[in-house]
Image (cartoon, rainbow, N blue to C red):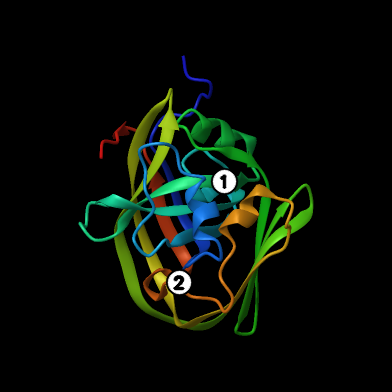
Amino acid sequence: MSETSLAAPQLVINSRMLYSSWIPADPQAAAALLPKGLQPATNRAIYMNQYVVDSEEQTSSFGAYSLTYLGLDLAGRTAPDGVTPSRFFTHYFNSSEKVRAYVRERGVPASPGTTTLELNGGELVATTRVDGTPIIRTVARVGSKISSVARGHLTYVTQVGGKLVAGNYPYVGELASPFELVSLEFLAKDHPVYALRPSSPLQKVEGWCWYAPRDSFVYPGGEYEYKQ
């Protein structure tokens, strides 16, 4: 019997989502967070997703929650599009114990945390907090137009019972235009996530920096063993 009563997969619609990617200040410290058998992508990129699900009506069973997760792009395997690198979760700060329990069963390193996205005029500020203390703050400039619809799958890798497991996450997101990632601050030097802090000046991976006022996706069931 599952630890949770939630069936897989789980659907989330119309989340408010800020996705960003950058080159870390200390690539070796970031790579040290990967388990044996995984290697960082050639450019050593870090990814991060900060998002908010405002109401339970936006989910099949999860209820409202907020989340920041981040980790490393991987070498050697891609998402189903054959281009986007597979990605490994190193940190996952979620406000809902229901969601944390669901993803822990699938090897995600889930821990408590909250995320807010505050849009004032054209400035978007995303703040990730643990125990009420801000640990990450992202600032972007965003427009009110939808320039395109991004769709496809992302592949995220976890560890379950000592094995590497991958899951494909389908998504459809309406991307706001114009968009500019202005700053990205890691505020807590004593927190383990500080190993993933960006270089100074900020080196953005432009194709993976965007804001979607409406992004829908699925948390998978049916994961499979990840083999290099």
From this viewpoint, which residue is outermost toward the top? 1
Q: Position of residue 172 (x, y in %)?
A: 35, 60
- Judge from the rendering whether residue 52 lies leftward or rightward of residue 136; answer left or right: left
Mark 1 is on which residue type?
A: Tyr
User: Is residue 54 visible from the viewing direction of this image?
Assistant: no
User: Picture coordinates of residue 216 (x, y %)?
Assistant: 41, 56
Secondary structure state at the residue bearing disc 1: strand
Q: What residue occupies the far left of the structure in this picture? A: 82
Q: Residue at x 56, y 67 (%)?
A: 198
Left or right of 142 on screen, residue 133: right
Image location (x, y in percent) of residue 209: 45, 71
Which residue is at a point 55% across and 61% down the rendered structure image?
A: 26
User: Viewer-proximal residue, 45 or 223?
Assistant: 45
Q: Amino acid at mark 2?
A: Cys
Q: Residues within 10 Å of mark 2 (few under 14, many from 20)?
A: some
Confirm whether residue 132 shows in the render.
Answer: yes
Viewer-nearest residue: 28 or 138: 28
Residue position marked by numbered label 1 in the rendering? 92
First-in-chain label (1 vs 2): 1
> Which residue corresponds to the image point at 56% horizontal and 71% vertical from the top-left?
199
- Report the residue marked by disc 2: 209
Decide which of 174, 199 is in the foreground and name it. Answer: 199
Quarter of the picture containing the C terminus is: top left
Left or right? Give the position of 91 relative to 37: right
